[in-house]
Amino acid sequence: MTEMESYPLSPARQLTETEMKRVWQKPASHKISEEERRISKEVRRNWNRGEMKIANILLEGDAGSGKTQLAKALSANFGLPYTKVTCFADMDKSDIIGAILPVISAEQLEKLEPAEQTVLKALYESDGFQSAIEILVDVLEMTQEQAAVKIKQLLKLASEESDSVEYRFYPSEIVRAYQQGYLLEIQEPNVIRDAAVLMALNSALELDGSINLPTEMIRRHPDFIAVITTNRSYAGSRPLNEALRDRVQHSEKMDLPTKEMMMERAMSKTGYQDEEVLSTLADSIIVLDKTARANAIKGVAGMRSLFYWTDAVAGGASASESLYHKVIYKITTDPEEIKILEDALEKHGLIAGLEDIANEVKKNGKITMP
């Protein structure tokens, strides 16, 4: 069963039907972590304490350590609509704020390619860039970065083709969340190259701040919460901007959960209940995670890997063979790095343990799930 905890921040606020749908609903597999409970209590305790208010949160850790899951859980706990923006290297100020753009006429629109028509129509019918980006990501299978670039190309084309005097301001998803009081997850802001873009983002995170839009000045909604999620630095990656860090009131170092919590989450997620097998799988993930970080291997062994590996083993796959397809090859395919990981598992007796599980499956057939 999903653990239910509630930390309402503005009980008198009435959300619209659309906003209610944006409040994250915890799945049955969700388990409350120490970080979730700690943040929730701290935010609620300080919510009405003026300058001591906590509304900018940093979650920093390895991929798969549960950062986005935690951000979504906070949406459920606080009763706030959840949305997110994924940062990329070439973000410009329009990605932070939005832009004033011409509306192309119906006649001119019909001259464009069908895919371009679809995107522009979605944009014209929406409140901002997000709807069009989702279409490109979901339908045309682009990344969010590719979608943002494509939209800007289309809008430039619309600007060149349009002789209309009708213009509209299209706010970014950041502005929408900022103005309407959502919980916004800002993923990987440390990849942004342009200092001016970072300055605009920093300004938006001031507790009593405002954003100068081309059409008006808007103030930060009192319910707006920014949750910054970023991967722990690897060799060659940029550290998180110091000015951005300075605007954070609460930070969490996100590591793998305890072994017991890992097993409990895997049980809940997959329905598989063999604690002896799960113990070996969890130990393997822990060893691989530590070994990868100690040897500057950029891939990560995390909870997602554990879930899919557990599910494969529960379905009858060999624990030792599926280790590679579900875990190791997600970390690296470099032969030398694979050898380092294998040696670490061998040193801890886990290779033999995984082979024992595989032999048990061969002997008795598919491991029975409850």
Image (cartoon, rainbow, N blue to C red):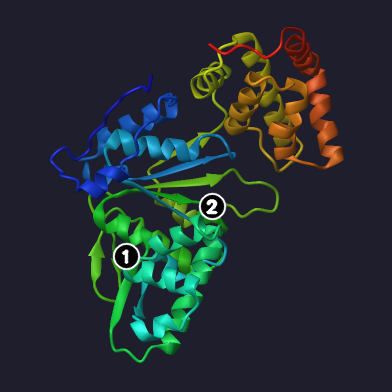
Mark 1 residue type: Ser
Closer-to-camera residue (85/364): 364
Quick one: which residue is furthest to the bottom in this view? 163
Question: x%, y% of residue 251?
Answer: 44, 39
Quick one: which residue is furthest to the left in this view? 12
Q: Is residue 143 above or below residue 341?
A: below
Question: x%, y% of residue 170?
Answer: 33, 70
Residue 111 appears in which quarter of the rendering?
A: bottom left
Q: CA distance from mark 2 to mark 1?
A: 32 Å
Mark 1 falls on what kind of element?
A: loop
Residue drawn 31% across the image and 33% down it: 77
Quadrant placement of the N terminus: top left
Decide: few, some or many residues near mark 2? Use Cα within 10 Å; few <14, some 14-19, many ≥20: some
Specify the label residue 240 is tagged with.
2
Residue hosting label 1: 126
Question: x%, y% of residue 220?
Answer: 26, 57
Decide: few, some or many residues near mark 1? Use Cα within 10 Å; few <14, some 14-19, many ≥20: some
Q: Earlier in the sequence, mark 2 or mark 1?
A: 1
Residue drawn 45% across the image and 36% down it: 69
